[in-house]
């Protein structure tokens, strides 16, 4: 998704753009090996959709024509947080879509394939990035083909959208450069997904999400509509609490979620696919922007820079916003100044990553077994988020703002506005007082 999105601005600046994909892509309607998490639900947040609309005008209509289900995130998605009333049902005034990963990727690839100077090489696995021995600049990619052949593709700019980012870090090691500082958050989440037909979510909602009763329990459930009238269902646990991959075990796991919504919606549904497990050990952020000797001609993007906890659905949208940043920056460079593009991009990409990282990495530390360096003043930050949740469940207008922030349409620092922060702190005080009353009641038993 990162590479396909970046192809649009690159095509307007370069004579030719080549996209390398390890899979053959003989049948674009199915899941593919190169995306191991492709069988699981993928979220395209409002900010990501808006970015695709900027790069490819009318993209939302293309998704709808392909079968994606329009969703008003305030009206169509039931959000349940244990201990709180559900978020209010509001008309947000904008929409996103529910669809499978193959559908969104196929739709985007077809848009990219229409660009005259873009070529997509399938069945090509990037082995390593080649650099100029004199200048150290990245100059090409050595590829291995499905047929066992080796080919070197030379380029003025190489975009590492490989996901792992190992192509970039291996080049840094091979050329004796500094490695980026890495921040990791070990979450060890385990989830299982399936495709069902005939789900019935209460009160006419199209989608539902039940959050864990954290930190006491870690189980989460999500139902998201997909094309052809089907529903993607995901159950998530942590560490040893892995959702089962047999039908009965899957239903029993769903029945033990903090609310009955997901179980009641799927208990009589039709099984379309088998249940597929997936593990995600850690979120990871690399600060390429501060590497002092970063090579010319190389630009990592998307998951190569930051890989988020997937349950928040941020990865694709952040990659798309980075492609929009690339679109803005590339207009200002020519052949002589092209070497400055990676450093400018990487430094500005940090700001794109900051908000979603804060919204996902900090909440993950609510579990004591989360590995990594705890953010400063963690307890106060977690309490602030609890206050935000409580206020959002009680105030529809504030919930509207929170949706825009979570969908990367507005900046997170809006919550620091004194008029908002004071209201959140008042809710924090009420939560604290309620907890004291509960503790007192328990002590009297």
Image (tube, helix red, strand yellow):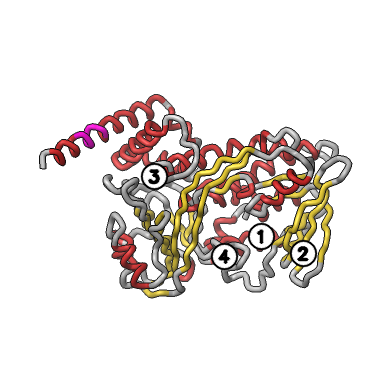
Determine the CA span between mark 3 and mark 4.
33 Å
Describe the element under mark 3 as helix, strand or loop.
loop
**Label 4 belongs to which residue?**
102
Q: Is residue 189 left or right of residue 179?
A: left
User: Which labelled disc corresponds to residue 111?
Assistant: 1
> Image point 49% across, 38% down: which residue?
358
> Image point 27% across, 60% down: which residue?
260
Describe the element under mark 2 as helix, strand or loop.
strand
Per the rendered image, the range of residues in magenta is: 432-436
Give the mark, 3 or 4, whose residue is nearer the N terminus.
4
**Label 2 belongs to which residue?**
144
Residue 403, above or below 380: below
Q: Residues within 10 Å of mark 2 (few under 14, many from 20)?
A: some
Asked if disc 2 and disc 3 are in contact, CB closer than 8 Å, the reply is: no
Determine the CA span between mark 2 and mark 4.
24 Å
Give the mark, 2 or 3, whose residue is nearer the N terminus.
2
**Label 3 belongs to which residue?**
367
Q: Is residue 329 left or right of residue 199?
A: right
Give the mark, 2 or 4, whose residue is nearer the N terminus.
4
Question: Does 282 lie within the magenta span?
Answer: no
Q: Nearer the viewer, residue 65 or 216?
A: 216
Give the mark, 1 or 2, whose residue is nearer the N terminus.
1
């Amino acid at each position: 998704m990162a590479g396909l999105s970046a192809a649009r601005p690159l095509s307007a600046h370069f004579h030719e753009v080549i996209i390398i994909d390890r899979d053959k892509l003989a049948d674009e309607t199915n899941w593919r090996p190169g995306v191991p998490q492709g069988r699981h639900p993928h979220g395209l947040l409002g900010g990501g959709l808006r970015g695709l609309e900027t790069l490819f005008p009318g993209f939302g209509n293309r998704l709808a024509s392909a079968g994606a289900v329009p969703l008003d995130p305030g009206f169509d998605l039931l959000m349940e947080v244990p201990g709180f009333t559900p978020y209010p049902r509001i008309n947000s005034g904008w929409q996103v879509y529910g669809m499978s990963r193959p559908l969104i990727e196929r739709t985007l690839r077809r848009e990219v394939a229409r660009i005259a100077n873009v070529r997509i090489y399938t069945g090509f696995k990037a082995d390593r990035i080649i650099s100029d021995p004199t200048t150290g600049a990245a100059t090409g990619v050595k590829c291995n083909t499905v047929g066992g052949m080796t080919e070197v593709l030379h380029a003025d700019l190489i975009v590492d959208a490989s996901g792992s980012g190992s192509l970039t870090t291996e080049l840094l090691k091979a050329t004796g450069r500094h490695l980026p500082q890495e921040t990791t958050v070990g979450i060890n989440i385990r989830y299982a997904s399936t495709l069902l037909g005939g789900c019935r979510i209460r009160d006419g909602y199209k989608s539902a999400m039940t959050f864990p009763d954290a930190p006491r329990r870690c189980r989460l459930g999500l139902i998201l509509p997909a094309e052809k009238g089907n529903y993607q269902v995901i159950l998530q646990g942590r560490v040893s609490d892995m959702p089962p991959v047999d039908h009965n075990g899957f239903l029993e796991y769903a029945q033990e979620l903090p609310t009955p919504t997901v179980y009641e919606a799927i208990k009589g549904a039709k099984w379309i696919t088998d249940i597929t497990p997936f593990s995600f050990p850690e979120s990871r952020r690399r600060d390429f922007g501060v590497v002092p000797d970063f090579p010319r001609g190389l630009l990592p993007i998307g998951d190569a820079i930051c890989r988020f906890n997937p349950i928040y659905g941020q990865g694709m949208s952040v990659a798309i916003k980075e492609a929009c940043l690339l679109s803005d920056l590339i207009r200002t460079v020519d052949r002589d100044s092209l070497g400055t593009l990676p450093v400018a991009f990487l430094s500005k990409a940090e700001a794109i990553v900051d908000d979603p990282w804060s919204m996902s990495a900090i909440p993950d530390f609510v579990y004591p077994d989360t590995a990594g360096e705890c953010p400063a003043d963690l307890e106060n930050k977690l309490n602030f988020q609890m206050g935000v949740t409580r206020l959002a469940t009680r105030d529809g207008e504030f919930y509207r703002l929170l949706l825009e922030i979570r969908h990367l349409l507005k900046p997170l620092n809006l919550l620091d506005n004194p008029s908002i922060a004071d209201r959140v702190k008042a809710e924090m005080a009420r939560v604290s007082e309620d907890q004291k009353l509960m503790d007192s009641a328990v002590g009297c038993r």
